[in-house]
Amino acid sequence: MKTFWLLGKLITLLFWGVVLFNLYQPLAQPFELMLRVAGAALLALHVLELGIFNRQLKAAPRSSWQRLQVVLFGVFHVLALPVHKAVAVEQPGEVAVDPELKIKEEAGNAENPGAGTVVQPADTGSGGN
């Protein structure tokens, strides 16, 4: 998959080179306008991607460098970024609850309304047999 992202980045970089060359030395008439419109559309799309993937880019190291690469390469850079998992932060006064316990407790309350018992998870470790 890395090869795919690298190839996409290379082709996008080549496209930006052609767009910049077209600004410096305009090509034949129908191609000049098409390249300018395509370059402007791609730039607008990449800026839109900055907004869409803002949270993921904030979590990445050196986020300003990552943002510049998104403007240049777009989704080819965003999808190559490592995924950062969200870490749950306990608020003061809250008690950490095992999600499995909470699900079992809610299931028990649905069967017996008013029952406030908490079911402990079964011991899945190997027994002493």
Image (spheres, helix red, strand yellow):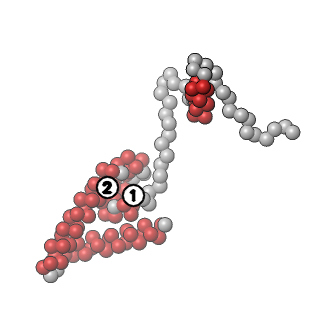
Name the residue that disc number 2 marks. 49
Q: CA distance from mark 2 to mark 1?
A: 9 Å
Name the residue that disc number 1 marks. 78
Say which element carries label 1. Answer: helix
Q: Quadrant of the C terminus?
A: top right
The mark that comes first in sequence, 2 or 1, is 2
Label ID, residue 47:
none
- Residue shown at 31% from the left, 53% from the top: 50
- Residue shown at 37% from the left, 56% from the top: 66
Q: Amino acid at mark 2?
A: Glu
Residue 123 in percent (x, y) is at 73, 35
Above or below: residue 95 compared with residue 124: above
Residue 72 in percent (x, y) is at 31, 63
Say which element carries label 2. Answer: helix
Q: Residue furthest right?
A: 129
Q: Quadrant of residue 32?
A: bottom left
Whether label 2 touches label 1, CB < 8 Å:
yes
Above or below: residue 24 compared with residue 129: below
Residue 67 in percent (x, y) is at 33, 55
In this rendered view, identify the residue nearer to me: 97 or 104.
104
User: Does the image show residue 28?
Assistant: yes
Mark 1 burial class by Cα count in 10 Å: few <14, some 14-19, many 20+: many
